[in-house]
Image (cartoon, rainbow, N blue to C red):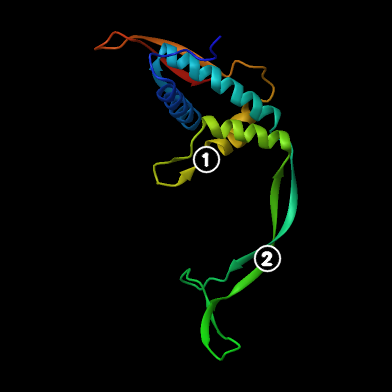
């Protein structure tokens, strides 16, 4: 038995549509699409939110040593002149060593992130900043639904679309 509706498309087109709709839904909180597509996106998103809630705090913190380039007041890298064994002079980027706290995911959380990355694509906001919807799912959406067992989405039917009379629906987060 198939896991998704066919939606009248070839499998590669169908998966691309579902990925784009799912990404738009997670980033915006609501989308308007056909009823069949809304039901499929709802099914996918419910599973992703459930995984995000389950793996929300399943990580540890670790201190690592990081080597970064020193920057001047204008944000450019600071160069230092060095001399080789042969007497040749060359410029090298001056580096500084810092300690930094990083988050280390547990194996189950990493697997959940990979599943989410399959369905959610990186996108850009209005200011052309890169937005990772997987991070948004863990940081903003999952904490809202911690005490809830499913039913994170709502489908509201809007009526027939002009042109092809396709049944339209609005999918939104509850």
Q: Which mark is residue 132?
A: 1
Q: Nearer the viewer, residue 153 or 36?
A: 36
Residue at x 43% of width, y 27% of height: 16
The kind of secondary structure element at disc 1 is loop
- Decide if residue 59 is on the left or right side of residue 35: right
Residue 132: percent from the left, percent from the top? 52, 40
Vertical position of residue 88 compared to residue 100: above or below: below
Residue at x 70% of width, y 32% of height: 55
Q: Which mark is residue 98?
A: 2
**Extreme-front residue of the structure:** 86
Circle count: 2
Residue at x 43% of width, y 16% of height: 37
Q: Nearer the viewer, residue 38 or 118?
A: 118
The crowd level at tag 2 (other Cα within 10 Å; few <14, some 14-19, many 20+) is: few
**Extreme-bottom residue of the structure:** 87
Residue 126: percent from the left, percent from the top? 39, 42
**Extreme-left residue of the structure:** 163
Q: Quadrant of the C terminus?
A: top right
């Amino acid at each position: 038995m198939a896991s998704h509706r066919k939606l009248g498309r070839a499998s590669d087109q169908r998966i691309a549509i579902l990925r784009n709709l799912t990404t738009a839904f997670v980033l915006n909180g609501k989308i308007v699409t056909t009823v069949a597509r809304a039901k499929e996106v709802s099914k996918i998103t419910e599973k992703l939110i459930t995984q995000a809630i389950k793996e929300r705090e399943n990580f540890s913190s670790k201190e690592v040593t990081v080597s970064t380039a020193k920057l001047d007041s204008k944000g450019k890298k600071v160069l230092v002149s060095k001399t080789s064994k042969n007497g040749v002079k060359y410029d090298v980027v001056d580096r500084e060593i810092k300690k930094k706290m990083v988050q280390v995911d547990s194996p189950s959380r990493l697997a959940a992130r990979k599943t989410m990355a399959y369905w959610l694509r990186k996108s850009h906001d209005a200011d052309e900043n890169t937005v990772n919807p997987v991070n948004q799912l863990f940081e903003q959406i999952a904490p809202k639904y911690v005490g809830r067992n499913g039913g994170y989405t709502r489908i509201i039917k809007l009526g027939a679309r002009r042109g092809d009379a396709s049944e339209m629906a609005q999918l939104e987060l509850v």
